[in-house]
Image: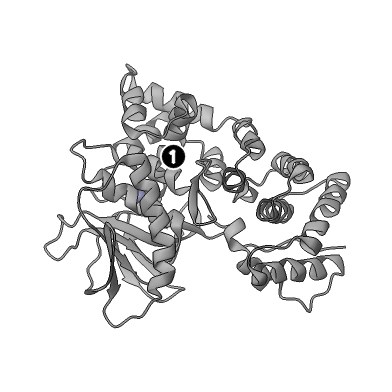
Amino acid sequence: MTRPLLLPLIAALCLCVTGCSSWQRAEEFEGWTLYVKSGESISNQEFFEAVQPAFETVEEYLGPFEEDVRVHAWIGGVEMTDGAKGTITTSSDGTIADVPGIGPARVRAFHSRGSTSPFGQSGVFVGTADSGTAVHELVHARLAEESTELPLWFEEGFAMIMGDGAMYHGEWFVDGLACWPWRELREQEIDDQRLTELLEVSSGESHSVTDNVLVHFIGWAIVFDLYRERGVLDWRVLFEDFQSAPDPLAEARRRLDRTLDRDTPAEWLRRLKDPEPGIRLAAARGTWKLHSSRTQRMLLSYLREEENPEVQACLAVNALATAGQVELGRRQSGWMWRSVFPVLRQTTLPDPEETSALRTLYRAYRYGNSRYDTQAALERLSRFWED
Ligand SMILES: [Zn+2]
């Protein structure tokens, strides 16, 4: 009766590149300053609303910034030449790179220490007003103030965990289960030799975009396991834990395998029972990327109990998007529509445009009416599924 959902499989990446452009000071905030690319106009307010909660989160977990942070903002992305080089672009299609062995990805932001090039400016560079992206880059900016030299994989892994989450009522809630890397790493089957190479990649040496992406992914998987074991997001504690192991390769392998265990997402998704709606929203967001019918069953069973409208919408949209990726049995498919339709038809979100997007999806899927623009409706609801 219904068509599967089409979702863009383009993932947002945050790589470390150096940027060189001229920038103008646009507005000063407490602890950070917004810079805009000369000749471009952006909404300062939109970037303030995305960056301010990110700034607060990073100070909460990593301590206060020692120096004022320069945040360079534009709308667009980065065209990559290799894993450590790229140029800023404002064209929307030029930012999609086909990462060999991984697929299409879009680089939206980076951090620059500014010391590698005489023209380089230090600070964070964000091509989108998105809090998760800002958190990731601000983690780099804060760690650059520390004297400890961290391996690239650890720093990227920690930044990925901090940047995975959701905005709920003006606050960034960290989750940490990065669904795309989880699925991608299980498909890649990285052997010990490849793992050794990736653990040794450093930001100072040239490396391919594929290697850079995989460094982020394995870093995420290892640090995520350290985080799950400790239950604290303190980079010093987690890094010390890793270093206390006698054999780094064996330790990396053990932790990578534990994160990639097929039961890990299901265990992590018990957070869908947390009393805090922001945590539930952060846990549900992006879960369709696991491409898992088991995860969909979890989303549907939690949806039955869920009373918060935003979390309801998030569970429903991710369950629906999963249906576009995996073959579901008749019973599960029937259960899905019975659970999802009431949300699409009745749930009222704080933003009227989001509510109207839910109704559009309802009419399109309930009545199979192709007159409705489901893609635009999904875009409007992207904060629930895109990360
Ligand atoms: Zn990064």
Closest to the observer: 158 or 213? 158
Q: How far across and how far down the image is residue 260, in percent?
A: 55, 33
Residue drawn 71% across the image and 71% down it: 356
Q: Is residue 358 above or below residue 192?
A: below
Label 1 sits on what residue type? Trp
Farthest bottom residue in view: 39
Which image quarter is the N terminus in? bottom right
Q: Is residue 208 visible?
A: no
Q: Is residue 372 above or below residue 243?
A: below
Q: How is the image coloured?
A: one colour
Q: Residues within 10 Å of mark 1 (few under 14, many from 20)?
A: many
Q: How far across and how far down the image is residue 170, in percent?
A: 50, 57
Residue drawn 26% across the image and 79% down it: 38
In the structure shown, which secondary structural element does the residue marked by tag 1 occupy? helix
Q: Is residue 257 visible?
A: yes
Q: How far across and how far down the image is residue 119, in percent?
A: 14, 66
What residue is pinned by disc 1?
220
The image quarter containing residue 299 is top right
Is residue 106 found left or right of 87 in the rendered image?
right
Is residue 76 found left or right of 296 in the rendered image?
left
The image quarter containing residue 358 is bottom right
Residue drawn 62% across the image and 37% down it: 274
Farthest top residue in view: 246
The image quarter containing residue 48 is bottom left
